[in-house]
Amino acid sequence: MKWTACLASSFAVCVALGISGAWADEGKVQFEHVMNIGSTGTGEGQFKYVEDFAFTKDGQLLATDAVHAWVQVFDKTNGKFISRFGGKGEGDANLDKPEGIAVDPNGNIFIADYNTGFIKKYDASYKWVLTFSEYGSEKGQNIKSEFMDIRDGKLYMPEAGNHRVDVFDLNGKFLFDFGGMGSEPGKMNNPEAAKFSSEGKLYLTDLKNDRVQVFDKDGKFLMSWGKTGSEPGEFKSPAGLAIDKNDNVYVTEIGNDRVQVFDKDGKFLTMWGRKGSNNGEFGNLHGIVVDKDTGLVYVADTANNRIQVFRPVGKLNVTAR
C-alpha cells in the first residue's frame, strides 16, 4: 500500500504506520489504531508511568504503573476500568514501584517491585499471598527488576541492575540465573523484557546492547539480532517485547518511538509509530502485549500516560512453523 493509497483509505491506519511507502508494501500487515486506555493522573483508570502488561486467567488486561504503584485491571475489549490493587504503603499487599508482571496457569499474579527487589504474588482475586526475593546482587536477590514471564512452573525475571535473568519456582524458591554484564553472545547490558514463545524459546530485549537475544529454558544462548540504528531491524533502546500466536516478535523502542515486528528467526516484517502524542505516535515506549485470541496489540505509551491499542489489518507474511 503506497502513501497515496493511505490518503484514500483509513487515516487512522496511515497515522499508526508512521513509515514510508518503501516499507508499506502490498501484502504487509498494517496496524490500525483502535482505542486509547487511560489518561494522566492517579485516579482509577489513570496513569503516571505505565510499564507492562499481562492478562488475567479470565482475559482481563492488567497494567502496572511505576509511579502511583497501582496494578490496574481493565476490560480488554472496551478499556473500561474494573479494579486496582497494590498502591503505595508498607503493608504486605502494597507496592513501591511495580514494573514486571506475569500470570501463572492458576491465575496467580506475580509483580516485580523495581525499588525494593521484592517479588509479590497475589491470587486471582488480587489478594496478597507471598513475598520473595529482595534487593541485592547475591543469588536470589535482584536490582532493578523488569518485565518477566512464566513457563513450565518457573518465573523468569530479567534484572537491569545485575544484567542477568533470575529463575524462581512459583513458590519463590530461587533456582538459577544466567547472563551477566557484557556484549558477547549470552551476556547482557540492562535486559528489559523476557518473554516465551510457544516453542519454549525465551526472547530478551538487551536494551543497552540494542539487540534481541534468544535463549532456551535453561539459559543456553541460541541466537540474536539487531544493532544500533534507526533502519528496519536496528534498535535504539529496545524495551518491551511480546509474542503473538504465530511466534512473531513485537519490540518497542524507547529511542526510536516505534514498534517493530519480526518473525521468530529475527526477520524484519513491519513497523509503525513515531514520536508524538497523536494516535499512532509514542513517547518513552515500554511494555507491549498481544492478545493471541484477537490479535489486538496493547502498547505502553508511557510519556503520554496511556495504553494505545491496535488491530492488524492484512496478514503477516509468515506462518507458524
Image: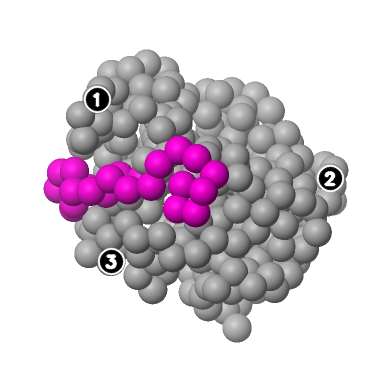
Question: Between 147 and 164, which is closer to the camera in this rendering?
Answer: 164
Q: Residue at x 53, y 38 (%)?
A: 144
Residue 248 relative to residue 21: left or right: left
Classify mark 2: helix, strand or loop: loop
Q: Which residues are magenta?
A: 119-141
Question: Which secondary structure dominates the residues rendered in magenta?
Answer: loop
Give the crowd class for mark 2: few <14, some 14-19, many >=20 residues within 10 Å: some
Residues at discs 1 and 2 in contact (Cβ within 8 Å): no
Question: Between 306 and 265, which is closer to the camera in this rendering?
Answer: 265
Q: Position of residue 168 (x, y in %)?
A: 40, 61
Give the crowd class for mark 1: few <14, some 14-19, many >=20 residues within 10 Å: few
Q: Position of residue 281 (x, y in %)?
A: 62, 31
Q: Amino acid at mark 1?
A: Glu
Extreme top residue here? 41
Residue 228's disc number: 2
- Looking at the rendered image, the disc whose residue lies closer to the viewer, 3 or 1, is 1
Q: Quadrant of the C terminus?
A: bottom right
CA gap between label 1 and label 2 equals: 41 Å
Q: Position of residue 143 (x, y in %)?
A: 52, 39
Classify mark 3: helix, strand or loop: loop
- Looking at the rendered image, the disc whose residue lies closer to the viewer, 1 or 2, is 1
Q: Say if 73 sits above or below 265 in the image.
A: above
Can you identify the residue that label 1 sits on?
A: 90
User: Which mark is first along the chain, 1 or 3?
Assistant: 1
Whether residue 139 appears in magenta in the rendering, the answer is: yes
CA gap between label 3 and label 1 equals: 29 Å
Q: Residue at x 28, y 60 (%)?
A: 171
Q: Amino acid at mark 2?
A: Thr
Can you identify the residue that label 3 sits on?
A: 105
Whether residue 46 appears in magenta in the rendering, the answer is: no
User: Which mark is first along the chain, 2 or 1?
Assistant: 1
